[in-house]
Image: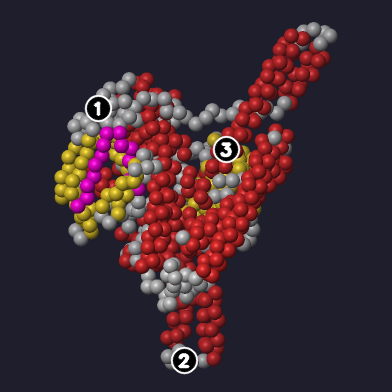
Amino acid sequence: MVSINNLNFHFGSRPMYQDANLHIRPKDKIGLIGLNGTGKSTLLRILVGEYKPDGGSIHMSKETTIGFLNQDLLSYETHESILSVAMQAFEEAISLQTEIDKILIEFEHNFHDNLVQKLADMQERFEALGGYSMQAEAEAILEGLGFSTEELQQSLSSFSGGWRMRVMLAKILLQKPSLLLLDEPTNHLDLPSIKWLESYLERFEGAVVIVSHDREFLDRTTNVTVEVSGAKLNYYPGNYSFYVEEKAMRNEIQKGAYENQQAHIRQTERFIERFKAKATKAKQAQSRMKQLERMELIEEVAPDAAKVNFSFRFNVQPGRHILRLEHMSKAYGDKVIFRDTNVHIERGDKIALIGANGKGKSTLLRIIAGTEPIKGKRELGHNVIMSFYAQHQLEALNVDNEMLQELQQAGSGKTEMELRTLLGSFLFTGDEVFKKIKVLSGGEKSRVALAKTLISEANFLMLDEPTNHLDMQSVNILIQALEQYEGTFVVISHDRYFVENVATKIWYIEDYQLKEYPGTYHEYEAFQEKREKAAKLQAAAAAPAPKKQETKQARSNNETNQLNNQLKQANKKLAEVEKQVQQLEEERAKCEAELADPNVYGNPDLLQEASLKFEAVQKELEKTNAAWEEQMLVVEDLESQIG
């Protein structure tokens, strides 16, 4: 489909890619990962032709069509409705519809056979292009991305940047390209929309390349991971979790090979130094010198991701109760956000506030901070010192300050060495701490603002979408910082991996009330799935029973026996599928061992063959696991019927 061969690309004198190679197959779902600045977005722009390579080649099949979602689309302005903007994807069908309407008007005074034939041909083409269903399809995708039915007729210009980006995503999805390039697609989506997009991409028949810092999203949408590192494109035949395990294994092998080679080099150098002046050994010494010159050096493994080694302490301990809201109500005109709800935050709470946009999450954070008026009682606890981080805090940074100056002026009283250590934890090292704020990227400014929030001596933090614009390494640093933080915090985030690792309580807004789940995000997800399943069963039970339906007590012995036989067969099939899962897991373990074999790892052809074999086994295992889950549901259903 797309073949990248020996790609070379430079920004000025800096090499972004050197002899990089990648093949994108028709149904590949690729997660493109790497540190900020390594060239992920650059590669997408090279693929669409915005940037020209300095060397190498990119070959695409003639049938390849590309859809590219990127931040530049935010600048698109129009007063057309969002439905009309999304339907621009059906350009040919809309043009045909205009022509068809003209012919129908012409029929009022000119009814010729050739005109009838022309109309028939146009209508046939219109139908082939999906013209009769295009509006329904556009509405379904826009609503899946979080828009209400009423909002579809509102103009694009009336929405904020994040919502406009959703419209542009809808337009690209409606175009159904054979290759979809998505640059940070989850940045402007809430959790329900992210889950909808995951489901859509699972059904999407073309190839996808995704740049994202959202680990959970990558795990659920990709089957290949490509890491941009060392100006190369490094291929891993699995999702992000597979990449993490596989990279650790490859690094271990590379580390051993590097150490062995270095030991051999040192030994050879000692031999040369010892015998180069001896006539009897000079020839051997020269031979070994040539061996060293010809030797292909193994690169040293890069150190692990940065660790936070800064202690986030505060001098004032708060009381047991951080904040209470009693009988709190909030509305904007006719739009009700909260109605007679109560909020209690206790010392040491680690809370994540999640849910769809527009439900009132950011409003609640402002209410807690005391900057939003309410009906009801707000009571702040004893000795509580608050600090609030939101995206607009980036605008509060003094752009003429250097990073170190900005933190020094935060009033924490920490020494320059302590502040430099903190900035080092946030990936600013050496002389970088003297960079002015105005030259930093959005992600870098976010890191400075977060560092400033964390050193504020606050014992209660409020963080609104702190992971936006952060790469994975920066997200991991923030997770480590919050794990070490001994105070209390409430965080809003749509990054499920982040929430799972920092929160011990989940807040969600439902029926104008704030509700709490006392557990991790994954436990909350399981709880919600059970709730939804129970609600469906309750709705089914409440539905009118079919006529002549027998009660469980009146069921005949014959029917019970029949159900028992079905259960026996279902359990037998379940055991067979379990056996297949076990066999595939054993086969996968063999493939992993083969990938770890230095003889295979050191041979590109054998490595590619082993990787493809592993990928095939992994896909079959995922398919068989899904079959096991389906069969388990069948067994559970039969058991519930038998009682």
Q: Amino acid at mark 2?
A: Asn
**Could you tell me how many numbered marks the image carries?**
3
What is the x, y in percent for residue 37? 49, 38
What is the x, y in percent for residue 333? 19, 58
Per the rendered image, the range of residues in magenta is 340-354
Which secondary structure is most common in the magenta stretch?
strand
What is the spatial separation of the Cα atoms under label 3 and label 2, in whole angstroms? 72 Å
What is the spatial separation of the Cα atoms under label 1 and label 2, in whole angstroms? 87 Å
SS for callout 2: loop
Residue in the foreground of this view, choosing between 227 and 369: 369
Check if residue 136 falls in the magenta segment.
no
Name the residue at the right extreme: 280
Q: Earlier in the sequence, mark 3 or mark 2?
A: 2
SS for callout 3: helix
Q: Earlier in the sequence, mark 1 or mark 2?
A: 2
Which residue is identified by label 2?
A: 110
Q: Which image quarter: residue 571?
A: bottom right
Which residue is identified by label 1?
A: 317
Q: Amino acid at mark 3?
A: Glu
Residue at 62% of width from left, 27% of height from top? 255
Question: Which mark is on residue 134?
Answer: none
Which residue is identified by label 3?
A: 245
Residue at 51% of width from left, 80% of height from top? 123
Badge nearest the viewer, 1 or 2: 1
Q: Are marks 3 and 2 in contact (CB under 8 Å)?
A: no
SS for callout 1: loop
